[in-house]
Image (cartoon, rainbow, N blue to C red):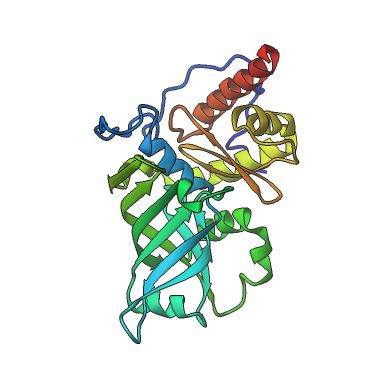
Amino acid sequence: MSNTFMSNTSMSETPGNSPDAAGSGPADAAAPPRDPRQPADFEPLVLARELLRMARVGSLGTVEVASGFPMVTLASVATDHDGSPLILTSRLSHHTQNLLADPRASLLLARPGKGDPLAHPRLSLRVMAEPAPEPRVRHRFLARHPKARIYVDFPDFLFFRLVPQTMHLNGGFARAYSGDVAPILARVADGEAFDALERSAIAHMNEDHADALRLYATRLCGMPEGPWQAVGLDPDGLDMMAGERVARLAFERPVQDGPGLRQQLRELAERARASGEDG
């Protein structure tokens, strides 16, 4: 296992000093002007980022080659380190042929729930599709969709990155926002270095810190008990799964390196333990 993440400092020790790395996300995304007609607790960037990172399936709108009409299909979704959605499709499908002919597309991501579907938040993205053959894309997609290993190597399958252009968020009644998508995406200073960091950190957390992952999921993310495992890391947060359930641990500051990541994970673990004592 790579030692990119591991050090002599344990999760329970006092964190050392390390400079915050440059990035985007909660720390430096410019908040949009608040509409006084909207609820005071409506945070569109936080909600949009959560929908983007937690979705496992989305409605994909492509331009049909034969007719020029919009065509909507369902697709399994993961995200790249920066937040760009990733999909795996077959060249035999209509939407793949559409994307190869015209990369313009849209993607709808929604939070499922009981009752009126229109009462739950959803995020619409206008995107440009591009083939994504990088090993990192395969790794991140399969971590979110392990059952796709059955067919990922079929010769007709390929990955696309859906590069976001604009977004429209509907968070429910009087909770709408349209605008630039950049504030909900993450900047990655060094793609290869961050990929190595992710693989090392995920392996280390799953092997040595299962209890911390359980605390993150149950006490900080409000999820039920389960066999929680880390499945993805990006500058803005840690993705965890237990079966089909997904939890998202958002960082307070974007991370780009091992020291910054260790410091935040320790702080969050301490907060999770303290929340149990308070309860």
Location of residue 171 by image quarter: top left
Determine whether, in the image, residue 193 is placed left or right of residue 274.
left
Location of residue 223 by image quarter: top right
Of residues 55 and 35, the one nearer the viewer is 35
Specify whether residue 239 is in view: yes
Q: Quadrant of the N terminus?
A: top right
- Percent of width and height locating residue 102: 32, 75
| 157 in relation to 247, above or below | below
Determine whether, in the image, residue 239 is placed left or right of residue 162.
right
Of residues 81 and 102, the one nearer the viewer is 102
Of residues 59 and 133, the one nearer the viewer is 59
Location of residue 266 by image quarter: top right
User: Can you name the residue that lies furthest to the front here?
Assistant: 116
- Percent of width and height locating residue 239: 58, 42
Determine whether, in the image, residue 152 is placed left or right of residue 119.
right
Of residues 198 and 7, the one nearer the viewer is 198
Specify whether residue 24 is in view: no
- Percent of width and height locating residue 41: 40, 28
Residue found 63% across the figure and 23% down from its top = 269
- Percent of width and height locating residue 59: 47, 63
